[in-house]
Structures are given as C-alpha cells and as structure tokens.
Image (spheres, rainbow, N blue to C red):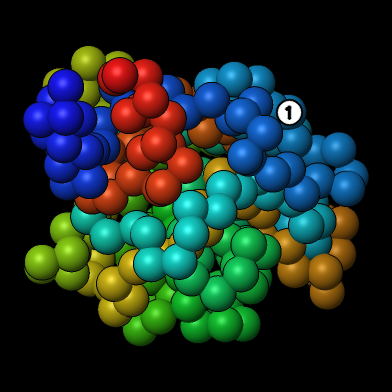
C-alpha cells in the first residue's frame, strides 16, 4: 500500500489532468460582481449587457507561482459590443485578484489575457501579455460568434497560443493567435473578467459573452486538490 501511495503522489505532482470541466460553483471560486452582471452555473460563466466601467469577474486563487505550462480547452461566445468595449474569456495575474481585469493589467503592466474586443464596428479576439505588450489579433469574426478554443502555454519556449476552432471536435481551424510572454508564473485566474475602467461612460458595453466547459491541464496541482485526490486513491 505504501508503494502505491508514493507512486500516486509522484504522478499527481508531475501533472494534473482534470478530464472534466471546472465547476465554477465550487466555493473556492469567488465572484466579484456588485452590479449582478454575471451568471454562474457549474460549467459556464456569462455576462449580459455589461458596461466597460463595471468591475466584474470571477476568479480562483491557485497560490503563488502556480501557472507554468498550461493547456486549456473551453468554449467562447460573444454577441456584439459598442465603442471599443472588451472583456476577457480567461485571464491570469500574479499581482492581485482584481489584476485579472483588463484595466488593471494596463495599469500594472502585468498579466495575460485572451479577450473579445470591438474596434471600428468589427469584432475580434485578442491574446495579450501586458508585461512586454506582446499581442496577436484574430481576423474579424462577426457580431455573434461561438468558437472552441485550445490555449497552450509552454514555459520552455515562452510561447502562448490560442487555436480558435469553428467546431467542438476541433477539426476546423479558424485562426491561431501566438505571443511571447515575460512572466513565468501566475497566481490568479479570472473568467469573464471585464475591463473595469471606472472612468468610462455608459456607452462602452459588451452585449453578451460567456466562457463554458473550461478544462485545464497544469504542470503542478494546487495542494488542496492534491490531498483530495490522494485521499480518494486510498
């Protein structure tokens, strides 16, 4: 029994593959949404008619220096925006929980985000490292668009890619975004993280957006989850 225990411990330290969508109703997830703009169910976080000046996001604190190599699959949906509004499907910060909001990333020159943006009447996806400002943009995707993403972060090469697929089977590739990044690790992950620039007026708005079925593989699991998995294996 002792040998089996040690083998399992080694496997879970080396890598973690959840194999199922993250449960956003887990109490470890925190919703910051004073205006009630977000809707959270087990596998999905969505927003509806949210102004860019509103502070709204859901986050998970994975602990310091957590995110290294990471792979994530998720579904991303947007339905229009006005006046250069933007909102992140997923975002990562090492500075603070509210650092997952895009305005905070601008101010702190720190963080990674994959977000939806409106620009001159067009609707795009952007992948950006705010430390060094490496960024890549999709082509115009239309007012209403659902896609199936695969995000891959490779620490050894300092590259981050998002493959945007038109189908859930991920066989019909629409676009690939690729950037380099500077920070090695992050602590907080945000989902449906709004821009949160309180200086803006009410005319900057994302009509609707959601992140769904987020399934991650990360190089090292957080201690709490590691203990749970081992106790189940006994």
Q: Determine if residue 57 is in view.
A: yes
Residue at the spot of label 1: 39
Residue 156 coordinates in the image, percent (x, y)? 10, 66
State the image quarter where residue 47 is shown: top right
- Give the left or right position of residue 103, taking residue 189 as reference: right
Residue 150 coordinates in the image, percent (x, y)? 27, 37
Q: Secondary structure at mark 1?
A: strand
Residue 227 coordinates in the image, percent (x, y)? 40, 36
Which residue is rendered at x = 34% and y = 58% of the image? 67
Total of numbered circles in the picture? 1
Between 47 and 216, the residue placed more toward the observer is 216
183, above or below 208, in the image: below
- Few, some or many C-alpha atoms within 10 Å of disc 1 (few <14, some 14-19, many ≥20)? some
Which residue is rendered at x = 22% and y = 46% of the image? 13
Which residue is rendered at x = 16% and y = 22% of the image? 1
Between 166 and 212, the residue placed more toward the observer is 212
- Give the left or right position of residue 160, taking residue 121 as reference: left
Q: In which quadrant of the rendered image does the C terminus lie?
A: top left
């Amino acid at each position: 029994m002792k040998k089996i225990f040690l083998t399992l411990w080694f496997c879970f330290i080396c890598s973690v593959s959840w194999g199922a969508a993250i449960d956003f109703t887990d109490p470890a997830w925190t919703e910051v949404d004073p205006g009630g703009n977000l809707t959270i169910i087990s596998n999905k976080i969505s927003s509806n008619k949210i102004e860019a000046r509103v502070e709204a996001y859901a986050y998970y604190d994975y602990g310091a220096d957590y995110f290294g190599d990471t792979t994530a699959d998720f579904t991303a949906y947007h339905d229009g925006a006005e006046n250069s509004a933007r909102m992140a499907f997923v975002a990562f910060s090492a500075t603070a929980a509210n650092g997952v909001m895009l305005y905070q990333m601008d101010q702190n020159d720190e963080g990674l985000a994959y977000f939806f943006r409106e620009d001159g009447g067009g609707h795009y996806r952007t992948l950006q490292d705010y430390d060094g400002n490496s960024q890549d943009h999709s082509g115009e995707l239309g007012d209403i668009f659902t896609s199936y993403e695969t995000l891959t972060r490779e620490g050894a090469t300092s590259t981050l890619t998002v493959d945007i697929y038109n189908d859930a089977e991920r066989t019909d590739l629409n676009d690939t975004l690729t950037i380099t990044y500077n920070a090695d690790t992050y602590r907080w992950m945000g989902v449906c993280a709004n821009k949160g620039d309180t200086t803006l007026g009410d005319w900057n708005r994302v009509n609707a957006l959601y992140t769904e079925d987020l399934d991650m593989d990360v190089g090292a699991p957080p201690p709490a989850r590691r203990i749970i998995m081992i106790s189940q294996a006994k």
